[in-house]
Image: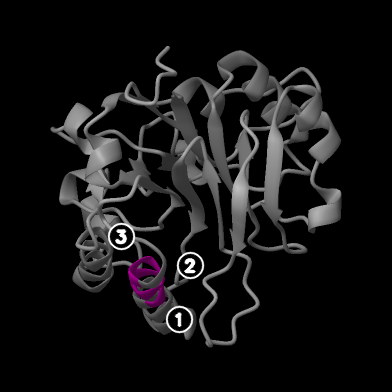
């Protein structure tokens, strides 16, 4: 089973890239973040023509998440379902081929002085509570998306500039560790143990060309899923260049992970 996560940074601006990417890679499950469109503006019909079901939680201008799957999903879940007022479209889930998949767009946090930073910390705590309420670590669960956290120092290319920011500090790393302690494993890290593999590069200052990036997009899985993971890679080619119709790349690259245990090994 090939699964992928991709912060597309506006499905409207990169609709052609999305459809082309799906045709090339044909993942079984694709988690998308930062759709920046309402549900009605997501290209459901076009992805259906390529063989995909779409579970969408959109939002105008900001945020927005989706799950695309070749198999028909069941038990779709929108948001965390807690009592905290929150109109941000940041989490969508569904059961696909017997496993529970979640596409998540963690808050960025802006900067340490912003009121968006405490929101980020609280949101991550809420996510841990959501996992505790809804799932058990012995179930097949895959949590993936743009986590907006670089877990380790070697996930940061320019530590003198980026360590200590909202993406790389002890507080956010501690919240992420608490999420992992639910019973999740980072299934990408074992294939790149020395670090230096990034999923996001700033548009400014030729960040991609100079490989000044961060690993902030992740795929986490419970042990019964993680044990079947046989590979993980970042699709750097998608981050480079432009398509014939002029659509530029997202500032994130797709992250692909293959699970052999589902019977859909490629």
The coloring applied to the image is one colour
Q: Residue at x 65, y 77 (%)?
A: 87
- Image location of residue 203, percent across then percent down: 53, 43
Asked if the residues shown at circle 2 and circle 1 are in contact, with their CB atoms under 8 angstroms apart, the answer is yes
Q: Earlier in the sequence, mark 3 or mark 2?
A: 2
Q: Earlier in the sequence, mark 1 or mark 3?
A: 1
Q: Residue at x 40, y 56 (%)?
A: 147
Was residue 136 drawn as part of the magenta stretch in this picture? no
Q: Which mark is residue 119?
A: 1
The stretch in magenta equals: 126-132
Q: Which residue is mark 3?
A: 136
Asked if the residues shown at circle 1 and circle 3 are in contact, with their CB atoms under 8 angstroms apart, the answer is no
In this rendering, the label closer to the viewer, 1 or 3: 3
The answer to whether one can see residue 76 in this image is yes
Q: Which residue is mark 2?
A: 107
* Distance in Å between CA atoms under marks 2 and 1: 8 Å
Q: Earlier in the sequence, mark 2 or mark 1?
A: 2
* Distance in Å between CA atoms under marks 3 and 2: 25 Å
Q: Is 256 positioned to the left or the right of 160 in the image?
A: right
Q: What kind of secondary structure does the magenta stretch mostly adopt?
A: helix
- Image location of residue 138, percent across then percent down: 25, 51
Q: Picture quarter containing residue 266? A: top left
- Image location of residue 149, percent across then percent down: 33, 58
Q: Picture quarter containing residue 29? A: top right
In this rendering, the label closer to the viewer, 3 or 2: 3
- Image location of residue 78, percent across then percent down: 62, 64
């Amino acid at each position: 089973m090939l699964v992928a996560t991709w912060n597309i940074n506006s499905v409207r601006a990169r609709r052609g890239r999305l459809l082309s990417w799906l045709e090339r890679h044909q993942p079984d499950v694709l988690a998308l973040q930062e759709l920046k469109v309402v549900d009605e503006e997501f290209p459901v019909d076009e992805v259906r023509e390529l063989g995909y079901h779409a579970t969408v939680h959109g939002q105008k201008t900001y945020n927005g998440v989706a799950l695309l799957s070749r198999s028909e999903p069941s038990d779709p879940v929108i948001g965390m379902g807690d009592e905290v007022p929150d109109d941000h479209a940041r989490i969508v889930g569904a059961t696909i081929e017997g496993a529970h998949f979640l596409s998540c767009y963690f808050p960025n946090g802006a900067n340490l002085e912003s009121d968006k930073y405490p929101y980020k910390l609280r949101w991550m705590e809420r996510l841990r509570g959501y996992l505790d309420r809804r799932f058990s670590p012995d179930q097949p669960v895959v949590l993936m998306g743009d986590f907006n956290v670089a877990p380790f120092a070697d996930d940061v290319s320019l530590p003198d500039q980026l360590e200590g920011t909202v993406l790389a500090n002890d507080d956010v790393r501690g919240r992420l560790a608490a999420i992992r302690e639910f019973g999740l494993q980072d299934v990408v890290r074992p294939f790149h143990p020395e670090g230096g593999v990034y999923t996001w590069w700033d548009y400014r200052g030729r960040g991609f060309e100079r490989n000044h990036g961060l690993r902030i997009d992740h795929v986490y899985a419970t042990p019964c899923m993680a044990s079947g993971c046989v590979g993980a890679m970042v699709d750097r080619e998608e981050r480079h260049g432009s398509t014939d119709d002029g659509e530029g790349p997202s500032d994130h690259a797709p992250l692909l992970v293959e699970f052999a245990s589902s019977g859909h090994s490629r």
